[in-house]
Amino acid sequence: MLEMPTADALERYLTLATQQMKLTAENMANQNTDGYTRRVASFSSTDMVNVNGISTSSGVTATVTAQRDRVLQRSLQQATEASSASSARTTALDNLQSLFTIDGSGDDASGIGAAISDFFNSVTSLASSPSDTNTRQTAYAAAQALVTTMNRTASQLSAQTTSLNQQIGTSVDQANGLLTSIASLNKQIQQAGGQDTSGLQDERDQAVLSLAKLVDVNTVTATDGTVNLSLSDGTPLLNGTQAISLSTATVNGNVHIMSNGSDVTGSILSGSIGGLLQVRDQDLPAVQQQLDSVASAIASAVNAQNAAGTDASGNAGGDVFSGNTAATLKMAISSGDGIATSSDGSNATAIGAVASQAIVGSLTASGAFSVMITSLGQTVSSATTTKSANDAVLAQTSTQVANLSGVSLDTEAANLTQYQRSYEAAAKVLSIVNELMAQAINLGQQTTVS
């Protein structure tokens, strides 16, 4: 049987070729648009109709689809969450470590290590001249310097906690803004009524990816094209077109994240908020606890030894320090006369000897402080390694997504040339068909077809 394309069918081919060229132009124009997913047209033939032995077809129909893969998109989302968490954590840890950075001379930025050594050395110097006022005042000043250094460092740690709380609060506000936007996009997709929603889906996927930079979020696509979102523990964030906002509350001085009255802080494990929470609730308190242990041990050991001697007035020695944390450490004496050296200086030697005693578990005060700094360094190093690995996974996944959904100008240019030639060929055939039809209608008389 002869299969003959009708003029209507050829016009449809021209329309489809035009649509292909417009689609290609749209892809090329959006090459650098964040979140844009490459569009392709798929074609299907219409049913053949046999009339008087002649098979005819109305041509083909085209369906435009965006090149997206939900499994790959989910992988990108998870990689984004992990990378954002490790990035936020390493930045916060770098700020924490900067308080204790060791310089070329071996001193740490906080000055605590040097202050500990200076105090015990100055007290030891009193052994040879326990009645010398100037030497006593030097030892008192060294004790005061140790207190000041401890207090300052504790204050800096507290300031970093405050900063982390502020960042967490700001990030929660950003998350709520994104949830509202995603809910709005869901509504537009739901109400599209069969129209192409590729652009809306691109915008929504980009918003979900931005949300993943803040928190770890589970995504479930509904049959109507909308997405539902929840935290890792299932706490809902978005049901269709209804956003469920997060809120904050202060618990024991720290910002906690709430959802419908429930504390979900512990459920946020990744995204930048997850990284900030890990530093605030784990890394920083570990450093604070170790520093407090050093401050408390020094105060307790020195006070105990001071009580074993006599002060400048011959009275039994009292406490040199008060307080049992770096933040609460204070001077309990008002001058160097309160240091109980004993008249022969023997107790000054004993107080100085506390420097070499295991007073923080099995470690000396200086040793425990050194271990604290080393431990912090190892934590930072481990976090940096994790960040590098997470960044590599994100880069690899992003490349996979780009290979599927991204726009290649070379590919689109080749397609554009092909579609132009298809259009020209169809136009030429249509012209010939029209000419033949005109001649047939006019019984072979030559006419001009426009």
Image (cartoon, helix red, strand yellow):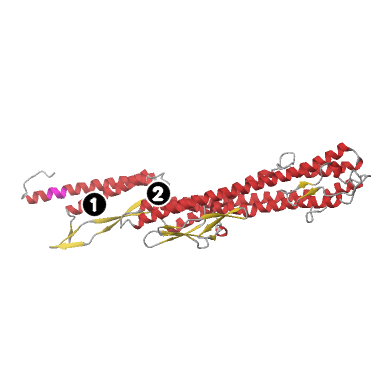
In the rendered image, which quarter contains the C terminus? top left
**Residue 127 visible, this angle:** yes
Q: Amino acid at mark 1?
A: Tyr
Query: Left or right: 277 with respect to 401?
Result: right
Residue at the disc numbered 2: 36
Q: Nearer the viewer, residue 69 or 369?
A: 369
Is residue 17 highlighted in magenta?
no
Q: Residue at x 16, y 48 (%)?
A: 432
* Residue 425, percent from left and from top: 23, 47
Provide the residue span drawn in magenta: 432-436
> Where does label 1 land, which residue?
13
Q: Position of residue 202 (x, y in %)?
A: 40, 51
Residue 342 in the image: above or below residue 183:
above
| Quadrant placement of the N terminus | bottom left
Depth order, front residue of 242/185: 242
Whether residue 364 is visible here, answered yes or no, is no
Residue 61 % position (x, y): 26, 56
Splitting the image into 4 quarters, where does residue 222 fall? bottom left
Q: Which mark is residue 206?
A: none
> In the rendered structure, which amino acid carries the disc numbered 2?
Tyr
Neighbour tally class for label 2: few under 14, some 14-19, many 20 plus, Cα within 10 Å: many
